[in-house]
Amino acid sequence: MQNPSATILQLYHSGRLSATLRAFESLPSSHPTASTPLSAAAYAALVHACSRLRSLPHGRLVHRHLLASSPPDGSAGLARNTVLSNHLITMYGRCAAPDSARAVFDGMPDRNPVSWAAAIAAHAQNGRCADALGLFSSMLRAGTAPDQFALGSAVRACAELGDVGLGRQVHAQAIKSEDGGDLIVQNALVTMYSKSGSVGDGFTLFRRIRDKDLISWGSIIAGLAQQNCEMEALQSFKEMVGDGVHQPNEFHFGSVFRACAAADSLEYGEQIHCLSVKYRLDCNSYAGCSLSDMYARCNKLDSARKVFYRIEAPDLVSWNSIINAYSAEGLLSEAMGLFSEMRDSALRPDGITVRGLLCVCVGYDALRQGRAIHSYLVKSGLGGDVTVCNSLLSMYARCSDFPSAMDVFHEMNDRDVVTWNSILTACVQHQHLEEVFKLFSALHRSVSSLDRISLNNVLSASAELGYLEMVKQVHAYAFKVGLVGDPMLSNGLIDTYAKCGSLDDANKLFEIMGTVRDVFSWSSLIVGYAQFGYAKEALDLFARMRNLGIQPNHVTFVGVLTACSRVGLVDEGCYYYSIMEPEYDIVPTREHCSCVIDLLARAGRLSEAAKFVDQMPFEPDIIMWKTLLAASRTHNDVEMGKRAAEGILNIDPSHSAAYVLLCNIYASSGNWNEFARLKKAMRSSGVQKPPGKSWIKLKGELKVFIVEDRSHPEAEEIYTILELVGMEMVKAGYIPELSRRSCKYVSFDHTDYDLLTEEMLAEYG
């Protein structure tokens, strides 16, 4: 019978690695004694086989067999053999078991440079870069000179950490070392500099390499492509191919296809595609995926799909790339078809797949597909992933299914800040403003600190309700956690203070911002001043803005035109409207046109306003017609009122405000026959004025109720407060003047309540 060691060595040297491990498994004893060990060469062959097959279970079994074969008296045996220990460290590193590699290394009585290099590599290639560099430092302190493999692994660890400073120190050590000029080290340095943003240093080093290999070219091409030097990457690839020494592989093609996509260079991409066909790499999974992605990014989805279907064995990355390409273009049906094909191919979609699909589900029409994806998530077990759940929540919000979005939120066991921001945004978008404050309170208790997106969502809800106290709380919190200096949040605070009527607070924050003010800061304050009738302040601020050379945006001009409208500066308003496009390249929008119509109508120049409506490049909307209708009532212009009301009712036949305002016009002009006819028409068509809503803060909590509604559980307390408010108004001498649109809101400085009545806004605002 042949010796077991000889059998193992024979199988190993013939390249039959799996058979080598099966021969080991067939040994009669799994607990050998010191008298029946395998030879050192056999153990080395077994460890090599485990390493090449990435078979950690077999590797551990061979290691245990080796340990059991050592003499019980602790004398030197194969388990303490330095060469075999080095092989074990390498095997554990390649099998993604760096802790086991470290245990072998720490247990070695004698170490040589190969031992250190193997241990450093085992940690670096498994993402334990800090540990790898720690070992490299210990090696230097121990007085062991690093070889090219240790230097290469240390440089790669610096590259993964993105620490170019530490990388330069390792580079200096490489220059001192005899092996520092080795191609392994030089290639690693080129990669490190390129990945760390010092691509110029990497390119200089690359040029100094005398005998470049495929890795050298691949490192610089990939580095240039990753650092937005796409044309330089393509030029390097052209130089490599032109030399004729090296034949590009799938990784070179992958890098240049990505460079073509980033540069939006379809022409170069098509030429390199032809070259990849020549080398028969267009069907390679890695190169083919990059090629398909290149066509997709260049808006050639048909070509992208053709390339994809030519890939011999598309992997998960390839499928995700083509599915996300269609998703990015909003082609939901095509993306869902590919998703179905992917599942039929026996590949299991992952979170990236479904997140891409969920992102393209927008609008009520896409809700059915979104629910189908949700069903798949539940069946496949992917529903527990927090990033997937966040996408699912956002999908339901975009598809106008707010209850389902809330259900997803409440069913989530793990939530991150994205989860909270998504549900807060959904509440704001769907006008569930009470829920924003409840969730904000829960969020404050759940996480250590809130970000600017969370706070801006609360500010949006506060602006809608005029909830000034909450705005001040958000401001105080932002100051406490150091977010008040964030321009986006500061702009949100200025805008919300202005919308709540606290213009002094808005102005103070605006001045504090100083040099970090941007066009949004200026525009928010200008609009705030304009909306509350401070036209002079708004126009002075606009003049100050122009003098500083700050380019206004479309919101700025909304504020300027509104300011002119409020104080009757008709000619000035028309002038500012006329310079928007020629001087600032701002094409007037519907909102700007509405401001001009309001400007002319408030001044009683209704015929000019009607002419402006007729000359607009788009059809008038309800807001424009309502502006004309309200002005017609003020100036008692029956004919213009009829035209405006007809314009509203053509868009929305059930719009109650048009009927009410037109009735008031007929009543004011004494045209009681038309008044009666219109009232009858309202009754016969079932048009009703929607009831107003009111908000009240009672005992620290915001309450919402319908006017004249007694079904609220705290109705008695609410109406008691309202009666007190009415009494205070009478004492203050307040008498509503119903014929004027002068009442925007009512606010009282009272410690027990804040009141804002939507009915007043609807009736007079």
Image (tube, rainbow, N blue to C red):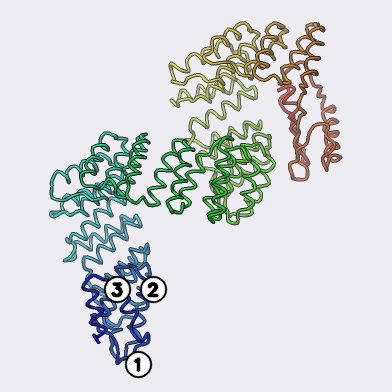
The residue identified by callout 2 is 57
First in residue order: circle 2 vs circle 3: 3
**Quarter that holds the N terminus:** bottom left
First in residue order: circle 1 vs circle 2: 2
**Quarter that holds the C terminus:** top right
Give SS at disc 3.
helix
Which residue extends farthest front?
1
Look at 17% across and 54% down and name the residue there.
213
Which residue extends farthest bottom?
73
The residue identified by callout 3 is 19
Pick the front one: 566 or 709: 709
Q: Is residue 86 above or below residue 123?
A: below
Pick the front one: 508 or 454: 454
Give SS at disc 2.
helix
Give SS at disc 1.
loop
First in residue order: circle 1 vs circle 3: 3
Of marks 1 and 3, the one in the foreground:
3
Of marks 2 and 3, the one in the foreground:
3
Mark 2–mark 3 distance (CA, rounded to whole Å): 15 Å
The tag on residue 72 is 1
Pick the front one: 645 or 155: 645
State if disc 2 and disc 1 touch (CB < 8 Å): no
